[in-house]
Image (cartoon, coloured by chain):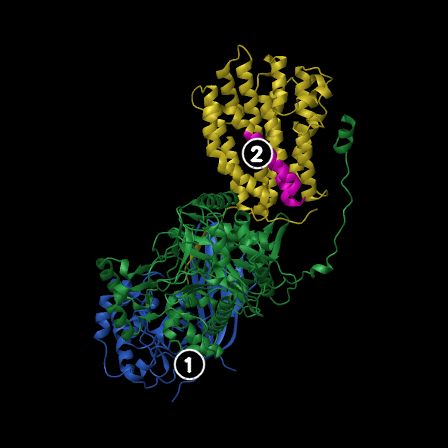
């Protein structure tokens, strides 16, 4: 029996504090959930404080971007994104064999080559070689399980600039690192893989109306005749709990808040995600 | 009001005016000081040199002689107070805005800059006089081209404003550079000659050369273009043209106050407290310059951006 | 006349000379120039040569090398094209620009040519010049290549072929304008009685194309030239173009984006800007999208262009077409998009990502020219025959490690042209950078272009940074059209001025009194 779709309300709030205040800043926010075969974005809005005019566009990777600038001096910048999304269970995985993957090589090229975050170090190459089993679908599962076991989830050890190889070296990391290692290995094995940015509901079976502290999350997609998702951090089936915001080669393509600011001070960031399963009426 | 100008271009025009005027003014000051030291018997040449460098705002360790002072004021390339430095800085500014300068004006400025090293060698062999008169020829040509080839738009107005403010300042320095009280009649004539004011003065003063008259003439003659007051009047009229007559403008206010002081001074009081008055002219000139910068040139240096990463779990 | 500079001109073996055929006869388009030069003595040529140099120094016609302003040496002998051959160059360049425009629109849009596998997708997506932030930026009149500088050489057989495409910020056109002006002043006798294709209307053509590219709904656009500043090697050119187009020359710090609009800071506050002819590389143009440490760019400008409120010329992302491996596919683009055969050939190029071609190229390594796909200015260029074997071994390893980053080409000993070398006319290798301007209606090719000359004997590197010089480049013998907007001579009224007035002490009256 297919699980029922969920309706999720997500509120994602990010605050940057500058000391001394920033003189001006230019920003791009990637926080609006996608509409895909598995999910439908019912509504989404982004609020900026200080208030500024927003310009929206879809980028090369198909992610919706909200761009804005703040021309005046500001000690703090708050970005609040509120979205209502209907999510469904995972779709099919396809059944492409190794030969089919190889013939797709050039068309899928972007998802088969390393990037600065997902470089092929000798260690990662050796790991990849040991994970090839049976067909591509089995191999993806093997890779995801291996990544889940190779890394211990711990915050504060790695940062936003940590590469797959560095995280593996540390043996600890967060969802971004799990996902980077996963796509690195898959690409090395010739399986097209992309990095997914989004949100995860913390509970497998939440009650309706209960607001939870959620998290912004990252997982992966592999192509084996169809694109399908896996979550190496949690090793759970990707489905109603997962809300997709953007897909790219690595974190750099889907950074939730990207920006530059003028003024000498350092910035500190705090972020909260609240996620509520709401009734579908 | 005239059409607006790019702030950075306006700033460069302003400084082209200031620097070329400074080169000319410095040449005129040096000319008279060197003459005075050589021609007047019993002049304390070393004292003159120190006084000259002080009045030009050039710091100098020890007791330079007149030739060292001349060398510093003519050729010190990195100094904004030397002729070569001012000419180089004028040319650098001109290069940055050469797209708005008449070709002849730019080429004239560039040719002068290209010729500087050769002129310096000449001056080593033949003394500073040749160099100083060459500089006066160059700046005369530049002024001529400015007046005959530039439209009277904001490019010309900012250049002329810079020139006028600098000229007020330089003429004040000229008066400050000499031991006026001790100067003979021939010394005063040299002073007048150095700024081309000998004949106009004689016509104005019916041939009587005396200290009060000369100081009065250089300080506030309304018809002589190098007098402090004439320069201030020109500066004020440029500001009026740029900003339009309405509304408060700080630079105009600053200039108005010092103008009033000069205009309403009793003729027999011009020599008393002259040094303090000259200092107020310097202050007013730099305050006006700063105010013009703040109001019109507010582009600042290139911004350095910092990237912020962030978001994501 | 015996012993003149033309008689003494000696051809090297095995190359095509622009002036003289192998039988020692002067080609017809050079007849006039050769006969004037033959009448000049060495002293005269030395003097003219010096005057050209001092004219450039006085005008400040310089490029910046290692922080020093240097004049760009101009040779006294022009390079001459026959009009008939030039017509072919025009056609070939226009065709190439149209195909490249279609390619850029395609790779930053639908990607038809990639779906059709005429060009492998992985080749485009792995190009350092393929900029994903340019995806979805649709220029208002469809033009991305407002100015193209497409380098052409003539091979040993006299065939003109394309060496590389420059669709980002092609530079050098200012030297074309300055060269013509200096030559007309210093060597007027070369010009008398000849119809030479005019170059002086380039700025008018460019500004017209820039205005035509303005955002929709802007009838009287403000156009600016964006320069990195006075320390950029091509600053002279930026200033000249701004002056001749009558537009403002701005630096990044003069600009500010607010919302999706772009403004420039003036003495009267912020004024809107609509078209930016930028001479800043993509990487430094917008610190929000590209290198955040850039201090010469303007953050937000790419999104202003995406919103259709500002036009950036040339467009962001054109570098993918300058990629030397992509270059090798331009003939395929011409067939795919235009269904035409290429008028101008490419130089034979090995695509090293294809194993069989790589093997053939490796086997012939010491005979070939090796170039990095994103190299320019004569850098990252290895000329096989003049490179020591140890260097080639290292190059081989580098190519094996990253074959996508390199191409190999047949070593073309490109044509020579007579050049004054201080003691006579001698053959020196020359290339050509013609300039094409696309206003969206048609591609206009300036008659002539920048001929660069390798000043060392036998040298094949012509870049100014590597000691190259230049030549005024003429197209002669064709019909020179009357510039648009000028009435026929018969219709111009001629004023008969009254005699000049005289003052009391001047002229005839005084002389009469004295008599």
Give the spatial CA distance, label 1 vs label 2. 67 Å
Magenta segment: B134-162
Residue C322 lies, with reference to residue B24, above or below; the image says: below
Q: Is C220 situated left or right of B124 in this image?
A: right
Chain identifier, colour yellow: B
- Which label belongs to residue C116? 1
Q: Quadrant of residue A210?
A: bottom left
Residue C68 lies, with reference to residue C227, above or below; the image says: above
Examine the rendering and report whether any part of residue C367 can be seen: yes
- Which label belongs to residue C276? none
Residue, x 60% and y 15% (percent of image)? B187
Q: Secondary structure at mark 2?
A: helix
Say yes or no: labels 1 and 2 on the same chain: no
Examine the rendering and report whether any part of residue A195 can be seen: no
* Chain A, colour shown: blue
Q: Quadrant of residue C209?
A: bottom right
Please say whether residue B152 is one of the residues in the magenta stretch: yes
Chain identifier, colour green: C
Residue, x 75% and y 56% (percent of image)? C493
For the residue carrying disc 2, how many other residues have a C-alpha within 10 Å: few (<14), some (14-19), or many (20+)?
many
Q: Position of residue B313 (x, y in %)?
A: 38, 66
Q: Nearer the viewer, residue C129 or C170?
A: C170
Residue, x 76% and y 49% (percent of image)? C496
Asked whether disc 1 touches disc 2, contact meaning CB atoms under 8 Å apart, the reply is no
Q: Position of residue B126 (x, y in %)?
A: 48, 24
Q: Residue furthest top?
A: B42
Q: How many marks?
A: 2
Please say whether residue C131 is one of the residues in the magenta stretch: no
Check disc 2 and report the residue beneath it: B138
């Amino acid at each position: 029996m297919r699980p029922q779709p969920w309706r999720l309300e997500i509120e994602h709030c990010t605050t940057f504090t500058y000391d001394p205040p920033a003189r001006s800043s230019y920003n791009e926010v990637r926080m609006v959930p996608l509409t895909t075969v598995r999910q439908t974005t019912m509504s989404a809005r982004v609020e900026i404080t200080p208030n500024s005019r927003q310009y929206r566009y879809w980028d090369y990777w198909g992610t919706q971007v909200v761009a804005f600038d703040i021309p005046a001096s500001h000690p703090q910048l708050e970005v609040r994104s509120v979205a209502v999304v209907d999510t469904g269970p995972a779709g099919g995985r396809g059944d492409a064999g190794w030969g089919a993957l190889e013939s797709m090589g050039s068309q899928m090229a972007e998802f088969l080559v390393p990037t600065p975050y997902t470089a092929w170090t000798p260690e990662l190459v050796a790991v990849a070689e040991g994970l090839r089993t049976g067909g591509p679908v089995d191999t993806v599962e093997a890779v995801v399980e291996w990544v889940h076991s190779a890394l211990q989830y711990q915050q504060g050890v790695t940062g936003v600039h940590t590469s797959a190889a560095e995280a593996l070296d540390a043996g600890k990391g967060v969802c971004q690192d799990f996902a980077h290692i996963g796509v690195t290995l898959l690409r090395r094995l010739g399986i097209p893989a992309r990095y997914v940015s989004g949100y995860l509901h913390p509970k497998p079976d939440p009650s309706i109306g209960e607001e939870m502290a959620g998290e912004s999350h990252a997982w992966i997609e592999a192509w084996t005749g169809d694109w399908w998702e896996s979550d190496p951090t949690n090793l759970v089936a990707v489905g109603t709990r997962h809300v997709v915001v953007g897909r790219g080669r690595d974190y750099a393509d889907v950074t939730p808040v990207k920006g530059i600011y003028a003024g000498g001070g350092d910035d500190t960031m705090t972020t909260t995600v609240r996620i509520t399963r709401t009734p579908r009426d | 009001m005239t059409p607006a100008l790019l702030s950075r271009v306006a700033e460069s025009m302003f400084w082209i005016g200031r620097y070329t005027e400074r080169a000319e003014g410095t040449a005129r000051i040096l000319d008279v000081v060197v003459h005075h030291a050589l021609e007047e018997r019993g002049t304390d040449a070393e004292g003159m040199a120190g006084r000259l460098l002080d009045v030009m705002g050039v710091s100098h360790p020890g007791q330079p002689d007149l030739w060292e002072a001349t060398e510093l004021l003519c050729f010190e390339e990195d100094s904004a107070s030397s002729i070569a430095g001012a000419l180089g800085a004028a040319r650098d500014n001109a290069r940055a805005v050469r797209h708005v300068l008449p070709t002849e004006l730019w080429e004239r400025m560039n040719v002068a800059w290209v010729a500087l090293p050769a002129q310096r060698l000449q001056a080593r062999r033949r003394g500073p006089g040749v160099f100083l008169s060459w500089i006066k020829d160059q700046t005369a040509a530049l002024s001529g081209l400015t007046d005959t080839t530039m439209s009277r738009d904001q490019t010309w107005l900012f250049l002329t404003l810079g020139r006028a403010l600098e000229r007020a300042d330089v003429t004040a320095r000229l008066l400050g550079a000499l031991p006026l009280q001790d100067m003979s009649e021939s010394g005063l004539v040299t002073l007048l000659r150095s700024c081309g004011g000998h004949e106009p003065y004689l016509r104005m003063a019916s041939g009587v050369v005396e200290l009060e008259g000369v100081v009065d003439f250089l300080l506030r003659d309304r018809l002589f273009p190098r007098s402090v007051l004439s320069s201030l009047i020109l500066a004020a009229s440029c500001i009026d043209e740029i900003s339009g007559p309405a509304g408060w403008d700080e630079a105009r206010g600053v200039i108005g106050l010092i103008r009033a002081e000069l205009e309403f001074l009793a003729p027999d009081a011009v020599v008393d407290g002259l040094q303090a008055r000259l200092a107020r002219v310097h202050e007013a000139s730099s305050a006006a310059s700063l105010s013009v910068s703040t109001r019109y040139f507010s582009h600042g240096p290139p911004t350095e951006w910092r990237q912020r990463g962030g978001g994501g779990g | 006349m015996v012993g003149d500079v033309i008689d003494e001109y000696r051809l090297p073996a095995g190359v095509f000379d622009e002036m003289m055929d192998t039988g020692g006869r002067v080609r017809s388009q050079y007849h006039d120039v050769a006969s004037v030069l033959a009448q000049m003595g060495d002293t005269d040529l030395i003097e003219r040569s010096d005057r050209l140099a001092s004219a450039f120094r006085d005008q400040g016609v310089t490029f910046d090398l290692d922080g020093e302003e240097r004049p760009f040496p101009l040779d006294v002998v022009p390079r001459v094209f026959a009009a008939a051959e030039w017509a072919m160059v025009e056609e070939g360049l226009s065709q190439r620009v149209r195909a490249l425009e279609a390619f850029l629109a395609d790779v930053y849009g639908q990607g038809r040519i990639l779906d059709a596998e005429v060009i492998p997708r992985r080749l485009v997506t792995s190009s350092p010049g393929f900029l994903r932030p340019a995806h979805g930026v649709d220029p208002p009149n469809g033009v991305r290549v407002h100015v193209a500088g497409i380098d052409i050489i003539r091979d040993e057989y006299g065939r003109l072929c394309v060496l590389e495409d420059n669709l980002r910020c092609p530079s050098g056109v200012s030297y074309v304008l300055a060269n013509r002006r200096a030559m007309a002043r210093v060597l007027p006798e070369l010009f008398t009685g000849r119809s030479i294709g005019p170059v002086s209307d380039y700025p008018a053509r460019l500004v017209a194309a820039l205005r035509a590219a303005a955002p929709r709904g802007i009838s009287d656009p403000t156009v600016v030239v964006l320069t990195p500043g006075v320390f950029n090697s091509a600053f002279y050119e930026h200033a000249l173009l701004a002056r001749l187009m009558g537009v403002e020359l701005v630096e990044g710090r003069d600009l500010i984006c607010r919302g999706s609009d772009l403004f420039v800071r003036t003495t009267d506050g912020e004024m809107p800007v609509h078209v930016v002819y930028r001479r800043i590389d993509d990487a430094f143009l917008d610190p929000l999208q590209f290198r955040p440490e850039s201090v010469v760019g303007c953050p937000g400008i790419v999104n202003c262009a995406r919103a259709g409120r500002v036009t950036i010329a040339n467009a962001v992302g054109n570098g993918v077409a300058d990629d030397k491996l992509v270059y090798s596919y331009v003939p395929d683009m011409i067939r795919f998009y235009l269904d035409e055969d290429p008028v101008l050939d490419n130089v034979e190029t090995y695509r090293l990502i294809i194993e069989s071609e790589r093997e053939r190229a490796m086997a012939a390594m010491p005979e070939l020219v090796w170039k990095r796909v994103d190299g320019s200015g004569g850098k990252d260029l290895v000329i096989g025959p003049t490179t020591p074997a140890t260097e080639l071994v290292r190059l081989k390893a580098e190519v094996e490690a990253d074959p996508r980053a390199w191409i190999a080409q047949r070593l073309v000993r490109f044509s020579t042209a007579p050049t004054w070398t201080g003691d006579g006319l001698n053959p020196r290798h020359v290339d050509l950078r013609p300039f094409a301007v696309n206003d969206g209606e048609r591609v206009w090719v300036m008659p002539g272009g920048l001929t660069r000359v390798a000043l060392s004997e036998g040298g094949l590197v012509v870049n100014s940074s590597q000691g190259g010089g230049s030549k005024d480049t003429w197209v002669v013998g064709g019909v020179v059209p009357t510039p648009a907007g000028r009435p026929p001579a018969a219709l111009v009224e001629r004023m008969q001025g009254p005699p000049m007035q005289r003052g009391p002490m001047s002229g005839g009256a005084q002389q009469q009194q004295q008599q």
